[in-house]
Image (cartoon, rainbow, N blue to C red):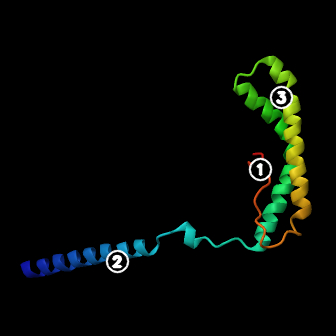
Amino acid sequence: MLSTRKALLKSVAVTVILGFGISQGVVWAQSYDPDQDVPNPTLAEKRLEKLGRGLSNILFGWVEIPLTFDRKMKKGKPLSYLLGVVPVLGTAKALMRTGAGVVEVFTFGKTKPEVNYEAILEPEYIF
């Protein structure tokens, strides 16, 4: 009885040790390196990204006006600055963003593959 119990304990111990060893091998096999594992975007994906960015900037370019007001107000600018300078500054930023969107929409399909598809303005999207 004692020898069968020892044999059973040994077989359980060996099974547990092998189980941990195998599970560690599986974990090592699933390491992830985004520089090597993420595929490069295709030309179609780059063009669609440029089109989407352009449409977003056309539709939401006007949002630069209230965002500029909000940013300057949080910086503690005086009321005269908020009512005099910020609307002009916000309108200029809105026109720039909308214009950049128009350029991206009209050139998304005509850009050569070797040209990079970086955004014209930073941040790429208003939100």
Residue mark closest to the camera, 2 vs 1: 1
Tell me the amino acid under the disc marked 2: Ile
Q: Which residue is mark 1?
A: 125
Quadrant location of the C terminus in the rendered image: top right
- Residue 52 is left or right of residue 8, and the answer is right
Give the amino acid at mark 3.
Val
Query: Residue 23: x, y in percent?
Result: 36, 73
In the picture of the structure, the residue carrying the numbered disc 2 is 22
Residue visible at 61% across and 70% down?
A: 38
Judge from the rendering whether residue 83 lies leftward or rightward of residue 4; answer left or right: right
Label 3 SS: helix
> What is the spatial separation of the Cα atoms under label 3 and label 2, in whole angstroms?
64 Å
Q: Residue at x 81, y 56 (%)?
A: 53
Q: Which mark is residue 86?
A: 3
Left or right side of 71 for 27:
left
- Distance of label 2 from label 1 (alpha carbons): 46 Å
User: Is residue 21 something that shows in the picture?
Assistant: yes
Which of the two labelled residues, at mark 3 and mark 1, occupies the earlier sequence position?
3
Q: Earlier in the sequence, mark 3 or mark 2?
A: 2
User: Is the residue 79 above or below the residue 107 in the image?
Assistant: above
